[in-house]
């Protein structure tokens, strides 16, 4: 089942979301080589039958909840889906550029138009809450909604712009260093993934998601303790050595999420996912990069020390 939490919602974990799963070794334009560990070994999850198919052969759609059975109704089998409607890397790059570009524009406008004050901080919190709600709505939808995703990106950008300006006013240059750090983590993760040093399997995903869920729960408890005055100076999220350790762990988890995003994109292209899936890929990448940037911003501030 898919998680309803937008942070943990990563298509590709199970059979019920239309992706081939993390144990596959897909080839572009066709099914995976071999069937071991492939929940769609009996058929491409995005494939449709061609003319002349044998209705008495094994049903290749038995494990695909989204594929329509062409033999359930009378009439000739459907023709294959046109390749022009399938997701490509260009689609993913273009949608990701649009989504991340919207985040950047929102951040720049917020930085330029909202001076550092309690009012702008309140606006940042409000924008973050709206972005969270929009992300939740999109995570519950089976199909991508470009309007929802771009709206999420815009409000997330406002939040990041105000927060970045606040950090910059105390730790000059922190946002720029955080951007460089985010790019470095993303580039290194992509290199490790493409080199095959990390193999995204179902077991890898389960272990990583368990650790990530435990991390979020601990952070939620820590926040409650801070709000009620039980933990001082931010508790686990302090600006000291303990906060630095927690921040590094959060960035490692962000890199883990990136590997899931890369696998989602790879599987979607290899299995001929519909073009609209590229919006979901862009959505996942944007959330992960925002996660890494925020944690990197805090980490830079911790190592910069107080002025």
Image: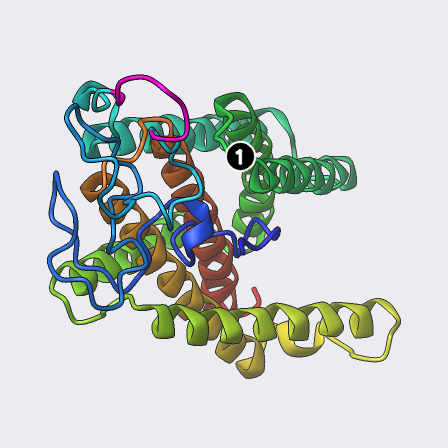
Q: Percent position (x, y) of residue 282?
A: 38, 37
Q: Quadrant of residue 229?
A: bottom right
Q: Nearer the viewer, residue 159 or 70?
A: 70
The residue tagged with tag 1: helix, strand or loop?
Answer: helix
Q: Percent position (x, y) of residue 304?
A: 47, 67
Q: Percent position (x, y) of residue 55?
A: 25, 35
Q: Main secondary structure of the magenta part?
A: loop
Q: Is residue 89 left or right of residue 221?
A: left
Q: Quadrant of residue 124?
A: top right
Q: Nearer the viewer, residue 18 or 175?
A: 18
Q: Count neighbours of disc 1 (C-alpha within 10 A) and say few if under 14, some if 14 to 19, many if 20 or more.
A: many
Q: Is residue 91 above or below residue 20?
A: above
Q: Percent position (x, y) of residue 15?
A: 41, 54
Q: Is residue 247 shown to the viewer in this render?
A: no
Q: Is residue 297 above or below residue 228?
A: above
Q: Quadrant of residue 70?
A: top left
The residue located at (74%, 37%) in the rendering is 126
The residue located at (23%, 47%) in the rendering is 266
Which range is magenta? 71-78
The residue located at (39%, 68%) in the rendering is 205
Q: Nearer the viewer, residue 32 or 302?
A: 32
Q: Is residue 44 shown to the viewer in this render?
A: yes
Residue furthest to the bottom:
242
Q: Nearer the viewer, residue 174 or 283?
A: 283
Residue that carries the numbered disc 1 in the rendered image: 157
Quarter of the rendering occupied by the C terminus:
bottom right
Quarter of the rendering occupied by the N terminus:
bottom right
């Amino acid at each position: 089942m898919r998680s309803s939490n937008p942070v943990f919602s990563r298509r590709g974990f199970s059979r019920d979301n239309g992706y081939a799963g993390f144990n596959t070794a897909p080839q572009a334009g066709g099914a995976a080589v071999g069937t071991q560990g492939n929940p769609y070994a009996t058929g491409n999850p995005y494939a449709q039958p061609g003319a002349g198919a044998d209705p008495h052969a094994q049903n290749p759609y038995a494990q695909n909840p989204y594929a329509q059975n062409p033999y359930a109704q009378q009439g000739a089998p459907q023709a294959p889906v046109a390749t022009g409607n399938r997701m490509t890397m260009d689609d993913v790059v273009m949608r990701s550029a649009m989504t991340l570009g919207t985040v950047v524009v929102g951040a720049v406008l917020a930085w330029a138009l909202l001076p550092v004050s309690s009012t702008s901080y309140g606006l940042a919190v409000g924008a973050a809450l709206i972005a969270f709600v929009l992300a939740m709505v999109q995570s519950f939808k089976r199909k991508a909604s470009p309007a929802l995703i771009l709206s999420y990106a815009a409000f997330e950008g406002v939040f990041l712009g105000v927060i970045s300006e606040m950090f910059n006013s105390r730790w000059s240059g922190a946002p720029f260093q955080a951007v460089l750090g985010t790019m470095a983590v993303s580039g290194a993760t992509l290199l490790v993934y493409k080199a095959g040093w990390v193999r995204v399997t179902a077991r890898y995903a389960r272990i990583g998601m368990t650790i990530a869920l435990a991390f979020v729960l601990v952070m939620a408890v820590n926040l409650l303790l801070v709000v009620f005055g039980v933990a001082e100076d931010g508790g686990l999220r302090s600006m000291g050595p303990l906060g630095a350790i927690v921040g590094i762990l959060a960035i490692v988890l962000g890199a883990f999420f990136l590997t899931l995003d890369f696998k989602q994109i790879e599987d979607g292209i290899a299995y001929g996912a519909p073009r609209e899936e590229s919006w979901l890929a862009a959505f996942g990448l944007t959330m992960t990069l925002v996660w890494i940037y925020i944690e990197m911003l805090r980490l830079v501030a911790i190592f910069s020390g107080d002025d």
